[in-house]
Image: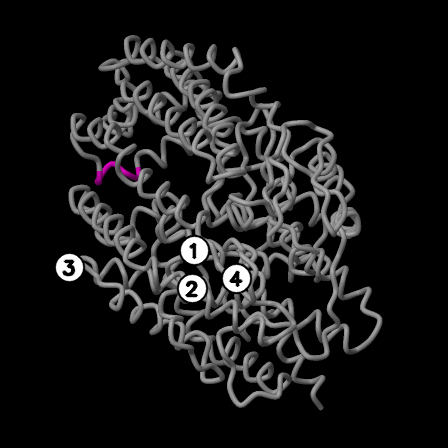
Amino acid sequence: MRDLPRPVFDANSTQASDFGDLPVWDLTDLYTAPDAPELSRDLDWLEQACAGFAADYEGKLAELSADEMLTCVQRHEKIDMIQGRIMSFAGLRYYQQTTDPDRAKFLSDCQDRITTFSTPLVFFTLEINRIDDERLDALFAANADLARYKPIFDRLRAMRPHQLSDELEKFLHDQSVVGASAWNKLFDETIAGLAFTVDGQELGIEGTLNLLSDPDRAAREAAARELARVFGRNVKLFARVHNTLAKEKEVEDRWRKMPTPQTGRHLANHVEPEVVEALRNAVVKAYPRLSHRYYELKRKWMGLDTLQVWDRNAPLPMEETKTVNWPDAQALVLDAYAEFDPQMADIAKPFFHKGWIDAGVKPGKAPGAFAHPTVTDVHPYVMLNYLGKPRDVMTLAHELGHGVHQVLAAGQGELLSSTPLTLAETASVFGEMLTFRKLLGQAASETEKKVLLAGKVEDMINTVVRQIAFYDFECKLHDARRQGELTPDDLGALWMSVQAESLGPAFTFMDGYETFWAYIPHFVHSPFYVYAYAFGDGLVNALYAVYEEGDAGFQAKYFEMLRAGGSKHHKELLAPFGLDASDPGFWDKGLGMIAGFIDELEGMET
């Protein structure tokens, strides 16, 4: 891979590529530089604000009047905003070039200082959870502005049965920088530093994974085998990371009396365990009519006796090799958004010309894509690794949907804007669906329509089937770790058990594929995060069905849902659309959309 220029923070800067000038982040809306006087000022303010907050309120929360409690919450919110701004700047700089030791040190130093500053605030949640329900209800009744924050109190108090002593909570807070966050950083730096050699060319992980969708089957195989070789050489380190994090989680869960390893995630997502279980069971039950059926079609289209892992994301034989330049990708997504509602496109436009997207592939840049909301008085940033593939256009539509959601939810303020993971995928998957429907409507031939439908089915399988298989892998991993240390072979066996079940009989698996659990960042950073993708896809499929049925005022209700951020439960958000995620039939409705696309594809065979 040729050297690329290091990113600079200039709103007009771009990175020249084969796909047009790709935008680069301008982080100056956060801070102009790591040594900016504004950043030093904010760190000093944060230290004093945390100490002052503790001095004013520790041991006194239960005695506050409604007006005093409102002032307390608002002061806490300002502290959250300033530390969020600092950590957003440090984190985004780091993800642009994770192999840069100066950026890694800056992130670590910021993390350490903020952890130290915020330790005196640990009392807040502990004392809130010791206030009687009647007392809190009276405070909410006395002050409408305070009552707006009730969802935050509800989420804090959901942890009441799992709260430890004040001293232990402070210890865990202080110890976090050398616990999970340190192992996360080791994982990130190791992944970003891996080097793969395919046909004499040295690539990073993103470029190598990209080859798994290359039209040349030999190139796909070479990439898959090189991934297996490099993962295999590093598998002991990855096994150590997973063993340590799973054990750490088990210890903390045991002390907190969490009934299952998943409980903490469900509480954080504000979703009932039975709803997640219904989703999981519906998807697993649907494997034969979704992934098994589709991959059998793909096997026939490719003229193979069996599919290998390097064929899973392969383009179809009838698919023309196509790249989409950046201006065309931008126009396509914005047009699709505008056709749904011009407001949606208007919110998305600044991302493209104000330095809110970092699109190019660069050495050391974190793999994958994300939208980071930063803080509510700035704006989100989107990261891509754009390589001009049609799927990259879908990724742009997806991440931009997150950005639109985050912009709309910012009006809720710092504490209420953030959505649970289960709802965080709503606008992203919806934006992706709008873009797909526009592409499908533009299809010039039956073959092009078939390719587009197949691509969408594969994306939906990756979002629903693959993520539920990931969830099952994590469930098995954490259960098994409770019985003792897991060897790389143990982890590989758990991985292969869910892969075979979810992908179906059309596949055989090469030696080495048992190590491919090693590079999935969600397992490391956010245990049990992955079911949120399937939750979001199912929810959006059901929402989209309502939209297609011509629901009156759908757009207005949709934007109202996004503006709600994290201020409402999923039942409240879905009720205006006549939907309920706790209804067992809800998930079948969403899965039915995928099955319907496969029906269409099968119909094209006759």
Residue contact at pointers 1 and 2, CB within 8 angstroms: yes
Which quadrant of the figure contains the C terminus?
A: bottom right
Element on which disc 2 rests: helix
Residue 31, picture quadrant = top right
Name the residue carrying label 3: 484
- According to the image, what is the colour scheme of the structure? one colour
Q: Nearer the viewer, mark 2 or mark 3?
A: 3
Residue type for callout 4: Thr
Contact between marks 1 and 4 (CB within 8 A): the answer is no
Q: N-terminal of the two: label 1 or label 2?
A: 2
Residue under pointer 2: 468
**Considering only order in the chain, which callout, 4 or 3, is on the residue closer to the N terminus?**
4
- Residue 54 at x, y percent in the picture: 29, 13
The answer to whether residue 475 is left or right of residue 591 is left
Secondary structure beneath label 4: helix
Amino acid carrying label 3: it is Gly
Magenta stretch, main secondary structure, is: helix
